[in-house]
Amino acid sequence: MKITCIGAGYVGGPTMAVIADKCPDIDVTIVDLNAQRIAQWNDDDLSNLPVFEPGLSDVVAKTRNRNLFFSTDVENAIREGDIIFIAVNTPTKTYGVGKGMAADLKYVELCARQIAEIAHGEKIIVEKSTLPVRTAQSLKTILSNNAKNLSFQVLSNPEFLAEGTAVQDLYHPDRVLIGGDQTPEGLKAIETLTSIYARWIPRERIIQTNVWSSELSKLTANSFLAQRISSINSISALCEQTGANVSEIAKAIGTDSRIGSKFLQASVGFGGSCFQKDILNLVYLCRYFNLPEVADYWEHVIKMNDYQKRRFANKIIETLFNSVSGKKITCLGWAFKKDTNDTRESAAIYVTTALLRDKAEIHVYDPKVTPEQIYADLDYMKQHHRSNDMTGIAGDMTTKELKDLVHVHNEPYEAMDKAHAIALLTEWEEFSSYDWEAIYNKMYKPAFVFDGRNLLQKDKLSKIGFEVYTIGN
Ligand code: NAD
Ligand code: UDX
């Protein structure tokens, strides 16, 4: 048996590396149109892999060129693969119908058309990308209208890994979900895919459903997770007005086994490529199916997240005497969470944009994110953000002006030297081990710290002399 995966990104790369590790008798080929990305996956120097994930380089080192291959030859991989995973990106549309809400399925459609053109014989096509419910129907329509001599089944097998813990999540998932047609052929395909995962995952954790339930479970899971964060963040605002402490509340409610303790960490706002995109997609689907009340309900999770990011940025501006113009603000962290180099939808991008709008001078340090990525994020924000409220620097600031105001450092102390304020935006653990006394001595006074992750020890910093703001306290 041979496996092909189209899309060598944050999902395709780690997922297939783990399958290759657990199934040494199966050849796994990951293909991508992006030649640079493939070259990075093939780089002898494993620190150059395009995806940073703890433990990933070890799995790649073990499997690469044994039974795991990275290639740009999409056609050949489609021809050879018995099971073809589609793990391409499905971002929010930035144009036309559904702009700013619906998932852009053009990359998925392209895969289906290419498979239809090239594939012969029997194939199982697996939706690994997160897709709106009923996408499998569109794939089937494209395949059956264009393919020749192809007998195929479409399965939905959404991925639940979280970045930063992807390798761990893939080896020990809470569950694997496989949806397919409830016909003899569909059930056989479900069983074929199940038997692969069953090599390392107990069968009782492999959930089999119909294809629509599987597709919709993924959007639902992400919406529920994000909703918990928006819920606790909404309470953090109330805490700040009342003297209650959001961390104490999270503990108090989280010990109720019906609520559970995970995903109750108040923050500057959730980021990442999935939560916002998937909820917007769910909202779009609800409106499409004429369920406005359901759409409004879920849309509020996003609105609360926008509010939290805006509230944090405004807090900085207000505290610094209502203007940050010309002041040096240091952002510690740019990634959307720790242990990843991914910055998509990171709260740092929004907070920085708001501060730039107030003419701050921004200095950034992140242990894993490159300067090119940071400038690209700000540029993208200028053009594409769905809310006018957030596209503050659009139009009136050129890329050159942006670069003049945003400085990226590869060393944290230099980034904080002579700063007016520090905004901690990603919970990288190294931030708590810095020499905060030395940092204080080199900052303008009053020296402000805005801890968007409640990572630092507030009492310790206050003792040194810092003015400290934490979320929900
Ligand atoms: P990504 O952008 O990191 O990777 C997608 C890759 O697909 C890119 O390298 C792109 O060049 C490639 N690609 C696009 N069209 C192609 C084509 N026609 N042929 C060959 N290659 C093509 O995206 P990702 O983060 O890996 O996400 C992929 C999907 O998985 C999305 O639907 C996402 O919602 C879902 N997902 C992501 C995560 C996550 O944590 N990132 C978790 C679960 C699910
Ligand atoms: C998420 C889902 O967790 C995962 O199952 C799905 O497959 C993809 O989307 P990911 O976005 O990679 O994973 O990371 P996650 O750990 O969920 O964090 C998302 C965002 O929420 C981050 O910005 C994180 O900092 C934030 N967060 C998370 C909080 O602010 N508070 C929390 O309690 C948890």
Image (tube, grey):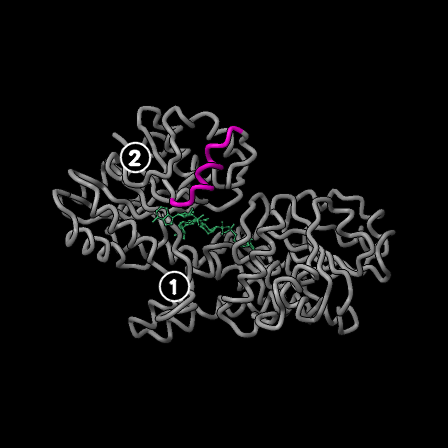
Q: Label 2 neighbourhood size at 10 Å, few (<14), some (14-19), many (20+)?
A: many
- Residue highlighted by disc 2: 3
Judge depth for marks 1 and 2 and give the one in front.
2
Residue 459, can we see it? yes
Secondary structure, mark 1, is helix
**Residue found 16% across the figure and 48% down from its top:** 147
Question: What is the x, y in percent for residue 206?
Answer: 32, 40
Taking 84 as reference, is 355 left or right?
A: right
**Mark 1 and mark 2: Cα distance apart in space:** 29 Å
Q: Label 1 neighbourhood size at 10 Å, few (<14), some (14-19), many (20+)?
A: many
- Residue highlighted by disc 1: 281
Check disc 1 and give the amino acid type: Asn
Taking 216 as reference, is 60 left or right?
A: right
Taking 399 as reference, is 461 left or right?
A: right
Region in magenta: 33-44
Asked whether 279 or 75 is in front, the reply is: 75
Look at the image and tell me in which quarter the N terminus lies.
top left
Check disc 2 and give the amino acid type: Ile
Taking 404 as reference, is 151 left or right?
A: left
Residue 239, can we see it? no
